[in-house]
Amino acid sequence: MASAATPATDHFRGEDFATLLDETLGRDTGFDGSVVRGRIVRLTDEFAIVDVGLKSEGRVSLREFAPQGVTPDVKPGDVVELYVERYEDRDGSIVLSREKARREEAWTNLEKAFEANQRVNGTIYGRVKGGFTVDLGGAMAFLPGSQVDIRPVRDVSPLMGVPQPFQILKMDRARGNIVVSRRAVLEETRAEQRSELIQGLTEGMILDGVVKNITDYGAFVDLGGVDGLLHVTDIAWKRINHPSEALQIGQPVRVQVIRFNSDTQRISLGMKQLEADPWENVALKYPPGARYTGRVTNITDYGAFVELEPGVEGLVHVSEMSWTKKNVHPGKIVATSQEVDVMVLDVDSAKRRISLGLKQVQRNPWEQFAEEHKIGSTVEGEIRNITEFGLFVGLSADIDGMVHMSDLSWDETGEEAMKHYEKGQVVKAKVLDVDVEKERISLGIKQLQEDPAADVLTSVQKGAIVTCTVTAVQSNGIEVKVDDVLTGFIRRAELARDKAEQRPERFAVGERVDAKVVSVDRAARKLALTIKGREVEEDKQAINEYGSSDSGASLGDILGAAIRRRNTDS
């Protein structure tokens, strides 16, 4: 009969069993993390059972033998290299990995290539922050954006999924980091090809190339190891706003070397130089004054470019676009791709410039108005604008006429007369003048009526004595009216012969006075008058009539006699 075991004995036996198990199987058998060769024994739905020469068989997921969605091309009897992840799991099986075996093999080969400074093959398959991921035969590497190409590449789609060589810049197996460069490979290859091509390169040479990259200012053409710039202005004789309108990446092109700088090794290419220059004999084809139909290709702040034929464009300056729209952007008059009729104004073949006119193919509205409305005719229109100096009246859809404030009323001042008008009001006016060159039409509203002061202006002469009515008293003189229709003004110094009497305040509105006409402004309908001059003249007449130098009578006696006689006559 066996004796019962003590707790201490059980504890010892448990520790001894664990120790023996570790020694037998080993937590670190030496196989974990290593790559071994094995033969596939059989296949299940999910795993391949592999004999790797150990006491247990291993298993590998079938997904590691082919991409997702593709049937694995393996069968019993195949020998494969595998990575030992765990020597034995809970089920006593060896956990193997085909993918990690590939990676380990790839790392080994990559390290050899890195030490020998050799290129490695890989495939760009994904995009990450700052660059791209590259598959180097099982090992993943990082391709910085700056190392993709010699020049910045906007679209890397043509490079994705294509096997190509790379140069390893940095490796850190402990961290699993690999940094590669495609640019270094291109620079090295291009340096070799460039030296061969450049040795025999001359300006004017015609070469075949392939469009490698497209930018806003042109396209880079691969000439076989050397890139040349095909500027957008050298693609075609006609206007091209963006190179993508005529070229696409990968397109074969034939180009001519326009310029070659041996110092900087920069090559400028041209395509249009291989075609006939459309500007030859352009002066004979487009004489000034001729009319043509063209297509608007470009609109700027200063005008619009119109294509007369492929490669030949002319500029319609903003000043030549419309007779009436002076401060309008060209884009509000024409649109891109619109067909328009234009007139050739000038041709400069040397500078490749043609000046065109858009308004010249239309009738000048100012000339048309002058022909249809003679001076003195009556027109009607809506007040479109009121300014501090007059009214603008619409005479057609495009032109206005101006009524100056002085031409609004015969009786009122301009400021008073303008109070009777408002924007949108329809008025009649008389055509006073049409200046086609300055594009001005002068109108008058008061001219629709006869000038009430016309008769007075005709009869009043300089030096005549007229009776006036005081209408306003000012500090510098008095305003008067002659026959209630003609305005006059008597300055302070002309109010009396005696200086003490030259006071405007001694006159009252409505008072009647006699004055002598100094000047007549018939255009302004105004008189300049003087009371002082009248008094001086009357004194001279009195002396001549009633006194003489030897009569002995005083001036007072003479004037008194003259006054008494005048009173008697009246």
Image (cartoon, rainbow, N blue to C red):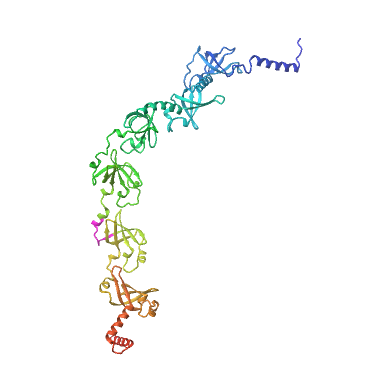
Residue situated in front as seen by the camera: 499 or 124: 499
- Relative to 325, is 527 above or below? below
Residue 51 within the segment the image draws in magenta: no
Image-quadrant location for residue 448: bottom left
Magenta-drawn segment: 369-379
Tell me, yes or no, whether the highlighted magenta stretch contains residue 370: yes
> Residue at left 25%, top 74%?
459
Where residue 529 appears, as percent x and y from the top left, is: 32, 75
Question: Is 26 displayed left or right of 320 in the figure?
Answer: right
Relative height, residue 45 to residue 544 (above, below): above
* Placement of 324 over or under 480, stated as above or below: above
* Residue at 36% across, 27% down: 199
Report the number of numbered marks: 0
Q: Residue at x 68, y 16 (%)?
A: 19
Assign the C terminus to one quadrant of the image: bottom left
Quadrant for the N terminus, please: top right
